[in-house]
Image (cartoon, rainbow, N blue to C red):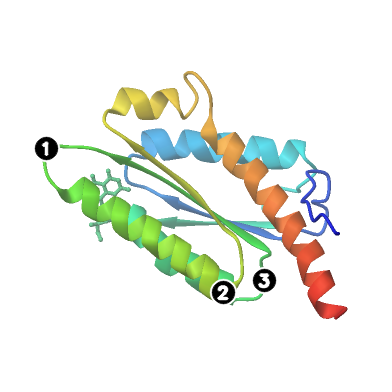
Amino acid sequence: MATFEGRFNDSTDLRIAVVVARFNDLVTGKLLSGCLDCLSRHGVDTSSTSGQLDIAWVPGSFELPVVAQALAKSNRYEVVITLGAVIRGDTPHFDVVVAEASKGIATVSRETGIPIIFGVLTTDTLQQALERAGIKSNLGWSYALQALEMGSLMKVVDKVNSSK
Ligand code: INI
């Protein structure tokens, strides 16, 4: 029996792309800060010249999948993190945006074989979103950890596949 697990200290040759939605940027900017803090504290060179990390901004969470797909297909990244915040208003728009973002991100991940981390907050209020983006905890940090784990795990699994 084999056990496959990702590690969190395996980041030196991991190339990561982060796709961030500008909509609700009061929240998504904080998710991005938490995400970058976690990556750099786990050994990822987050400087603009490192080539290890790239950031793409999109208008809203609805646009996250198409850009995540382009980046995942580029062969430049082992893992892509998406960050967004969809806050329920008085219209059905919330459900449309959440459904398209979540379905789209899951599809891109399965079809490209590149892990795409679903870092989209879905909340009823701005207060709840802010609580998850730094006031109480910062889920951007957790999304970064999940990216490190999945990037590392996929390396292990790919090695097993190529040695068959
Ligand atoms: N985009 C978000 O990221 N969060 C939201 O809460 C949101 N709401 O509520 O409308 C939102 N809408 C914009 C959408 O993602 C697209 O950018 C827009 O429809 C253009 O395609």
Q: Residues within 10 Å of mark 3 (few under 14, many from 20)?
A: some
Q: Nearer the viewer, mark 2 or mark 3?
A: 2
Label located before the other in sequence (3 or 1): 3
Tell me the kind of residue under disc 3: Arg
- Circle 3 sits on which residue? 76
How far apart marks 2 and 3 lie (CA) works out to 12 Å
Can you give x and y, in whole percent of width and height, for residue 124 in the image? 26, 31
From the viewer's perspective, is residue 124 above or below residue 4?
A: above
Q: Is mark 1 within 8 Å of ligand 1?
A: no
Quadrant of the drawing holding the N terminus: bottom right
Q: CA distance from mark 3 to mark 1?
A: 40 Å
Q: Position of residue 23 (x, y in %)?
A: 32, 46
Dot 1: element = loop
The location of residue 65, given as percent across then percent down, is 42, 64
The answer as to whether callout 3 falls within 8 Å of ligand 1 is no
The mark closer to the camera, 3 or 1, is: 1
- Residues 93 and 26: in front is 93
Q: Which residue is mark 2?
A: 112
Q: Residue furthest front?
A: 1
Residue 90, which numbered label? 1
Residue under the point 64% across and 50% down: 147
Looking at the image, do the residues carrying marks 2 and 1 touch, with CB atoms under 8 Å apart? no
**Count of labels shown?**
3
